[in-house]
Image (spheres, helix red, strand yellow):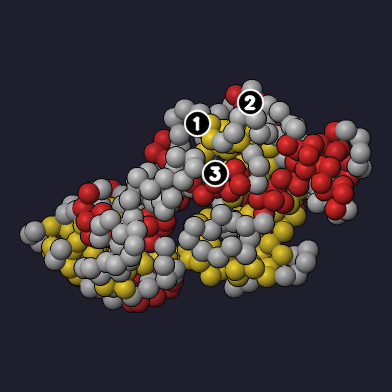
Amino acid sequence: MDYNSQLLLEDGSSFIGKGFGFPRVVGGEVVFNTGMVGYTESLTDPSYRGQILCMTYPLIGNYGIPSYGDLDDLGLPKYFESMNIQVKGLIVNEISSVASHRNCERTLDQWLFEERIPGISGIDTRELTKRIRADGVMRGGMAVSEVAIPTEQLTKVVDETRYDGFNFMQEVSTATPIEYGDRSLPCVVLIDTGTKFSIIRNLIRVGFRVVCVPWDSTISEILSYKPKGVVISNGPGDPKMCGATITTTNKLIDLSIPMLGICLGNQIIALAGGGDTHKLKFGHRGQNKACTDLESELSIITSQNHGYGIEPGSLQSTEFDAWYLNADDQTVEGIKHRSKPVIAVQFHPEASPGPNDSIALFKKFKDLIINSQLVDNGKIDRKKKGTIINRSENSNRREEENFRGMK
């Protein structure tokens, strides 16, 4: 640790600190996350692709980094959301040089060095966060080196950095289909626009097998798996860059395929349905974001990581209604189709890191699939297809048995 380090923002603001991790110069969009824990999950979240992440909690790294080799039943690493760090750089007020936890394998500094990611500590992260809140997210250049990097070189890095209008899908999406879970279980196709492993885990947990497909898969490729439903994952960047996914999603809506959108997937479904999206001033990134269910008027605490949102007024000309609103700024946090089995949320029901208040949405998605089957079999009114039907315990048991029998 203790390399020379500097962070330069596009407005000319400069922050000098101590470098750690891997010595290099990078550019990216500078954002902040207000979570107190979960830095391993956050740093491996593909939604952070192309960004330099500032952690607002003052001390980071005290419980270290676990092993990628500690796997779950699916063969996925238990404590990470992808197979490598996704951020371009990390900013903290204080990095812990020692770490203590029963699963700790190495320190945060060592992990960043191994994955060639630079870090900067010792700067006023509160001041940096206040600047981003006041002026909005902005491009930044970050230098960690044994010798001081000239400001002119960092300015050039900032000028050459691309985030808005850049398509990150080739960097975060799977190149080929990957199947997870028991092949005897009903299939759900997961369109990978930068998915977190925890989405796969939770879909398996509620009784599906998952086929993860590339972001630009065609409607015929998706239907070839005969899915009972489709999930569109989280991911980085502007949703309008995912034109192929939007086109496919539009066709899936027309076919009344049960769908769940998460984060970027929420925005893609809105665009496919005729809505619009916009970039937020500084986004929502943290683990304590309150959202209100407009149907029940109940609020839940959610984990979030996004810089774009749905334009509220644009839903008026669509078949979608706002479902959840952010309790702080009233931005749209979820939508629901008026007649088709399509739901989407802006927050992360899989959490990781974060609270589990919204994890029941995976069960709600499963109920949408069951209800859709009942519609197709003529057992419930088609007008209720997009809703969750209240059923007796015996009815639930029978439908669960039928669900497990789906092939």
Can the viewer see residue 164? no
Determine which residue is flagged by label 2: 225
Position in image of residue 108 (x %, y %): 27, 60
Residue 378, relative to residue 341: is it above or below? Answer: above
Q: Amino acid at mark 2?
A: Tyr
The tag on residue 178 is 1
Q: CA distance from mark 3 to mark 1?
A: 11 Å
Sequence order check: which comes first, mark 2 or mark 1? 1
Label 3 with label 1: CB-CB less than 8 Å? no
Q: Quarter of the image containing the C terminus?
A: top right
Q: Residue at x 61, y 47 (%)?
A: 205
Q: CA distance from mark 2 to mark 1?
A: 12 Å
Q: Secondary structure at mark 3?
A: helix
Can the viewer see residue 335? yes
Q: Quarter of the image containing the N terminus?
A: bottom left
Q: Residue at x 8, y 59 (%)?
A: 146
Q: Secondary structure at mark 1?
A: strand
Badge 1: few (under 14), some or many (20 or more) residues near its Cα, within 10 Å? few
Residue 56, relative to residue 213: is it above or below? Answer: below
The tag on residue 200 is 3
Position in image of residue 378 (x %, y %): 91, 35
What is the residue that sits farthest to the front in this orientation?
Answer: 102
Q: Residue at x 69, y 51 (%)?
A: 363
Position in image of residue 87 (x %, y %): 34, 53
Sequence order check: which comes first, mark 3 or mark 1? 1
Position in image of residue 340 (x %, y %): 79, 43
Q: Amino acid at mark 3?
A: Ile
Label 2 with label 3: CB-CB less than 8 Å? no
